[in-house]
Amino acid sequence: MSSGPLNLRSPREIRLMSKAGGLVWEAHQLVRKMIRPGITTGEIDAEVEELFRRHAAVPLFQGVAGKVPFPAVTCMSINDEVVHGIPGPRVLRAGDVLSVDTGCKVNGWCGDSAWTYRVGQVDTTADKLLEVTEAALELAIELLNSCEYWSEVARQMQQLVETTGFSVVTDFVGHGIGREMHEAPEVPNYYSEEFRREGDFELRTGLVLAIEPMVNAGGREVNRLPDHWTQATVDGSWSAHFEHTVALTSAGPRILTGPPED
Ligand code: MG
Ligand code: MG
């Protein structure tokens, strides 16, 4: 998906990207408000689509090529579903966890962010999984300040996850982001010698990365479901996914898909 030279963005370009990021953040606030037992994932997706339309933003997920083009503006992955779930008639129930991933393009610049939400009260394993996955994302962003290479960040994210007994999904990785949603480099959430040798990159000012740990409560293996899109854990264990679009600026990392700064 993402090879080639790394794009370094100017402060002006990062400001432009924060418009798309801000709208993605707004979409997540909308999702957060709508989530309750009894609502369908399709209803939530329709509201996000409407929000993007009102702001003349181009949804990034709709129409993504596959055996079946992706039919929605969000991915909604429930419980043991890891990523790429298709919103539809499925009704949320208390105790579910719902991973929502969405992205849009505003004035030619992209933002991408995912969050796993609790539907009512969830069991203690699911609760801990969400905490740990969010903490892995927070740790990664913090480490952008002090690490020289991404592989060091990835190693520490993986350690944080594995000390809890959970596992990092290795079939999917984060990515550079800018004019396109998926740009170089690949941004894995785990360490490997192969990556350190062949894919590693220096954490330079101007890089904009979509950092997105995906963590399973059980084993790391995932399988695609017959709908051609949804990826679920092989062992049926819970899965969580947190993602921010983050710019490395001369003043440190800046989350572009977070709340407005001023
Ligand atoms: Mg995403
Ligand atoms: Mg992404």
Image (spheres, rainbow, N blue to C red):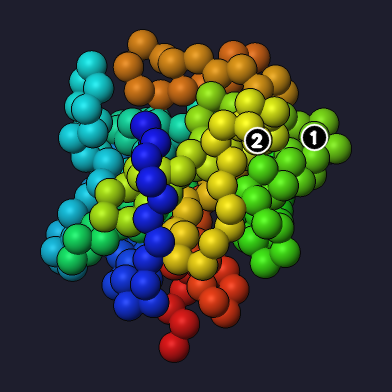
Asked whether the viewer can see residue 149, the reply is yes
Rendering coords of residue 51 (x, y %): 23, 62
Query: Would you say 63 lies left or right of 79 here?
Result: left
Rendering coords of residue 219 (x, y %): 70, 20
Task: Select label 2 or label 1 by which is in front.
Answer: 2
Q: Name above or below for residue 250 compared with residue 181.
A: below
**Element carrying mark 2:** helix
- The crowding category of the residue bearing disc 2, from other C-alpha atoms within 10 Å (few below 14, some 14 to 19, many at least 20), is some
On residue 162, which mark appears?
1
Residue at image point 25% right, 22% down: 66
Q: Earlier in the sequence, mark 2 or mark 1?
A: 1
Residue at image point 33% right, 35% down: 87
**Element carrying mark 1:** helix
Q: Name above or below for residue 202 compared with residue 66.
A: below
Q: Nearer the viewer, residue 253 or 79?
A: 253
Which of the image's four quarters has the N terminus?
Answer: top left
Rendering coords of residue 235 (x, y %): 65, 14
Residue at image point 44% right, 88% down: 262
- The crowding category of the residue bearing disc 1, from other C-alpha atoms within 10 Å (few below 14, some 14 to 19, many at least 20), is some
Name the residue type under label 1.
Answer: Glu
Q: Nearer the viewer, residue 258 or 38?
A: 258
Rendering coords of residue 70 (x, y %): 24, 31
On residue 196, which mark appears?
2
